[in-house]
């Protein structure tokens, strides 16, 4: 059940169109579907504003399809991250309308798109090799109802490339910066703008980069105020967090509560946390 479903049901009850026992049954229904290999949370959207998200890595295509079918039936939209071609093939065979975002390694499926809330999220990538992680953030944020502006290949080795895009960063409500190597870019961006800033270290670099640990520590030790850092290669986490921030900004501008209490609902209508079957 989604927040709009709950609000519609309560409004119909208020108008005398449905009996009280039907309303009680809807809210008392078991919130978990047990598939044996996964327990699918059917009330995630009601609590969080967006349904459960599937982390594809480590799951078989058949498992991903089964989980997606349950989420789609309950919530009308599914986001799956870290999918392989085999995952995408199986999902698109079952759901031909599913979209495979190859660079982002994501797959999206929805009965109808969420309306775009006001405001922009900027996703900044230091280099082309950071694009898979950056695109994961883009797909996540867009699928949750946000407008996203890409600012790519603006690493500090050519600082002039970043400066010419400064207006794009200054006009965004929240900025995600994706960088590998020494990960200096978030510190530079943090010194140029006064907006919420989320850093995503990537596992891009040579030997002493230690699979992204150097970038992670560089961001954590940044001298730029207000920089929040997610885990290595966690574009999904950054996109989800940015969506929550943008939802609060949009809600404050419209003087209404943030939809669903979470990052995904459009404003002003009330409309994930990742599946415990395999969180990233």
Image (spheres, grey):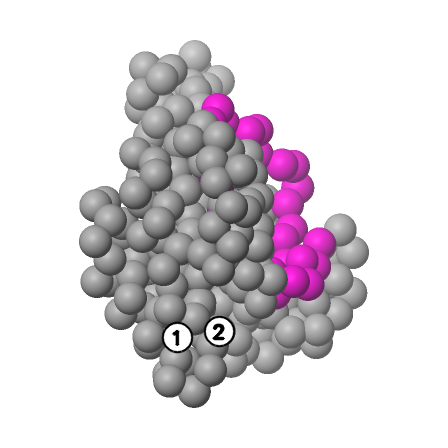
Residue 59, percent from left and from top: 54, 78
> Number of labelled discs?
2
Q: Residue at x 57, y 51 (%)?
A: 152
**Callout 1 environment at 10 Å: few (<14), some (14 to 19), or many (20+)?**
many
In this rendering, would 45 be left or right of 148? Answer: left
Q: Residue at x 44, y 67 (%)?
A: 180
Assign a secondary structure to mark 2: loop
In this rendering, would 177 be left or right of 98? Answer: left
Which residues are the magenta region? Answer: 99-123
Look at mark 1 in the image and give the residue it sits on.
212
Q: Earlier in the sequence, mark 1 or mark 2?
A: 2
**Residue 186: in sight, yes or no?**
yes
Q: CB under 8 Å between callouts 1 and 2?
A: yes
Quadrant of the rendered image containing residue 192? top left
The C terminus lies in which quarter of the figure?
Answer: bottom left
Q: Determine which of the numbered discs, if any, sits on residue 204 in the image.
A: 2
């Amino acid at each position: 059940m989604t927040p709009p479903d709950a609000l519609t049901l309560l409004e119909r009850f208020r108008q005398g169109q449905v009996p009280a026992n039907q309303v009680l049954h809807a809210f008392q229904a078991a919130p978990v579907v047990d598939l044996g290999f996964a327990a699918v949370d059917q009330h995630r959207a009601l609590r969080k504003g967006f349904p459960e998200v599937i982390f594809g890595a480590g799951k078989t295509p058949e498992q991903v399809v089964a989980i997606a079918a349950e989420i789609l039936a309950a919530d009308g939209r599914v986001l799956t991250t870290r999918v392989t071609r085999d995952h995408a093939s199986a999902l698109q065979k079952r759901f031909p309308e599913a979209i495979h975002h190859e660079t982002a390694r994501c797959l999206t499926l929805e009965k109808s798109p969420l309306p775009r809330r006001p405001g922009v999220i900027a996703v900044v990538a230091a280099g082309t090799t950071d694009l898979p992680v950056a695109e994961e953030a883009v797909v996540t944020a867009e699928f949750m109802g946000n407008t996203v502006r890409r600012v790519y290949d603006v690493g500090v080795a050519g600082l002039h490339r970043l400066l010419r895009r400064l207006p794009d960063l200054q006009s965004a409500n929240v900025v995600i910066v994706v960088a590998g190597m020494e990960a200096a870019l978030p510190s530079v961006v943090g010194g140029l703008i006064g907006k919420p800033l989320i850093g995503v270290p990537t596992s891009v670099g040579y030997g002493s980069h230690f699979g992204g640990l150097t970038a992670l520590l560089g961001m954590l030790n940044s001298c730029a105020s207000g920089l929040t850092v997610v885990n290595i290669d966690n574009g999904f986490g950054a996109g989800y967090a940015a969506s929550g921030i943008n939802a609060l900004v949009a809600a404050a501008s419209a003087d209404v509560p943030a939809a669903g209490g979470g990052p995904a609902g459009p404003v002003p209508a009330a409309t994930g946390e990742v599946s415990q079957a395999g969180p990233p």
